[in-house]
Amino acid sequence: MSDTPDLVDSFYRDLVRPLGNVAILFAQAEASLLDLITVLGELSESDAHAILRAPNAKQRVLELVRSSGLDGFDLMEIKRGVDSFWNDKERRNRFFHDEWFPDVFQGGTPMTRGLPRRKGSDRVVFGNPNAHDVWDLARCFQEQEHLFSATAYHVRRRRRSDID
């Protein structure tokens, strides 16, 4: 497939690989977060999935984190990771759901235009993502995936040792 040319216009080509990495790494981070929710809440995957889809998902996940028994640096790190996941998810949503177009006044520089998503908002959001910014976002999701999966592993391990 390496001989298959990109389907996008040439001014988007620098963004194709980093956006593909964002798509995959976001999905992996979200799956690890789902696993973490199942562990922290001792929930089924479908119940954990319902939490992730709830309008107040971030707050519900943070409640699970606070009641998890984690403390000190571990608690601070996972709370920070959950918070940053939601901020990064918003950035990812801008890349994947906004309209992409070339700025003809800037030599075809890629731009995005997002319509308001929240009730009561009429503000159009413009962006000018570059490959460096998109790669940074991909790395953030990679770090979050590692954090969520490691935390789930340690919580499972701690619970097993409490039983023994």
Image: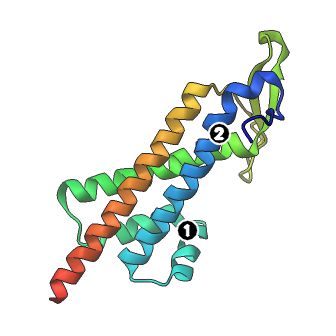
Q: Distance between the residues labelled 2 and 1?
A: 23 Å
Vertical side of 86 occupied by 10: above or below: above
Q: Which residue is rendered at x = 53% and y = 38% of the image? A: 137
Residue kind at label 1, given as amino acid type = Leu
Specify how the rendered protein is coloured: rainbow
Label 1 sits on a secondary structure element that is helix
Look at 39% across and 60% down and name the residue there.
148
* Quarter the C terminus occupies: bottom left
Closest to the observer, 158 or 113: 158
Residue beneath label 2, please? 19
Ranked by sequence position, the earlier of labels 2 and 1 is 2
Classify the position of the N terminus by image quarter: top right
> What residue do we see at 33% from left, 57% from top?
78
Task: Name the front one of labels 2 and 1.
Answer: 2
Please indicate whether residue 6 sits to the left or right of residue 19 in the image.
right
115 horizontally vs 67: left or right: right
Give the x, y percent position of residue 158.
Answer: 21, 75
